[in-house]
Amino acid sequence: MRAAPAYPDLAPGERALAETPLGGATAVLTDRRLVVTGRDFEQSLPLAHVALVRVRFERTGRAIAFGVGLLLAAAVLFAAASPLRALLLNQSVSLEPAATEERSANAQSGAAGGIASGMQRILGALAAIVGLFPVAAWLLLAVGGLRIALGVVGRTVVTVAAGGAEVEFAQRGNSRPLHEFVAEVGRQLPGPRR
């Protein structure tokens, strides 16, 4: 079960005008400030210091491109696994006559295995590693698909310019409540005095 998002402590007499959830955090607009509170942080900006609030929806092209790259890597691993494993095993089998000869010669002299036996072990280990390529390919396929999906879903990003600094917070997807929250923040900002 997911824990409830954190909520800021309000000062006496301070009242909340609008709020919106941000995953594990909450953004709250009060009559005095804009507060973003998470499980282990709280960021507060007095409304008098807020110069600009922007909201935008963006599809993250980098996530999509990275996901496509992972899918291509998975395709390469799927395509290469079987032929490469067969090649390594065939090379190991072709070394069998030489390894047998070395073993019989070493049995008489009491020496350890030779070059052909060592190469057979190395080729067998490499074939076992290549045998894991399909598992790695399935993982790349899953992660690549997830990255593409997250890139297509996009995110809504809010930028708050206050006191010479910018603060950004985001939520996955095109969040209508976040757009409405920013519109309310814009209405509450102090305007020029006449």
Image (cartoon, rainbow, N blue to C red):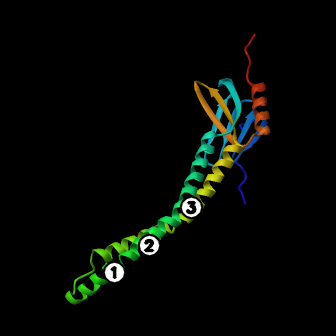
Front-most of residues 84 and 162: 84
Image quadrant containing the C terminus: top right
Q: Which mark is residue 97?
A: 1
Left or right side of 67 for 106: left
Q: Secondary structure at mark 1?
A: helix
- Which residue is located at x 70 percent, y 47 percent? 23
The Cα–Cα distance between marks 2 and 1, rounded to whole angstroms, is 14 Å
- Which residue is located at x 79 percent, y 36 percent? 18
Front-most of residues 183 and 92: 92
Left or right side of 24 for 107: left
Give neighbour class at mark 2: few <14, some 14-19, many 20+ (Cα, 10 Å). some
Front-most of residues 127 and 61: 127
Point out the frontmost of discs 2 and 1. 1
Point out the frontmost of discs 2 and 3. 2
Q: Secondary structure at mark 2?
A: helix
User: Which amino acid is tagged 1?
Assistant: Pro
Query: Is residue 158 visible in the rendered structure shown here?
Result: yes
**Residue 20, image x, y percentages:** 76, 41
The Cα–Cα distance between marks 2 and 3, rounded to whole angstroms, is 18 Å
- Which residue is located at x 55 percent, y 60 percent? 79
**Residue 66, image x, y percentages:** 58, 46
Q: Earlier in the sequence, mark 1 or mark 3?
A: 3
Q: Which mark is residue 89?
A: 2
**Residue 156, image x, y percentages:** 71, 38
Image quadrant containing the N terminus: bottom right
Badge 1 vs badge 3, beta-carbon distance below 8 Å:
no
Q: Residue furthest top?
A: 194
Q: Residue furthest left?
A: 109
Query: Is residue 16 visible in the rendered structure shown here?
Result: no
The Cα–Cα distance between marks 1 and 3, rounded to whole angstroms, is 32 Å
Point out the frontmost of discs 1 and 3. 1
Mark 3 = which residue?
78
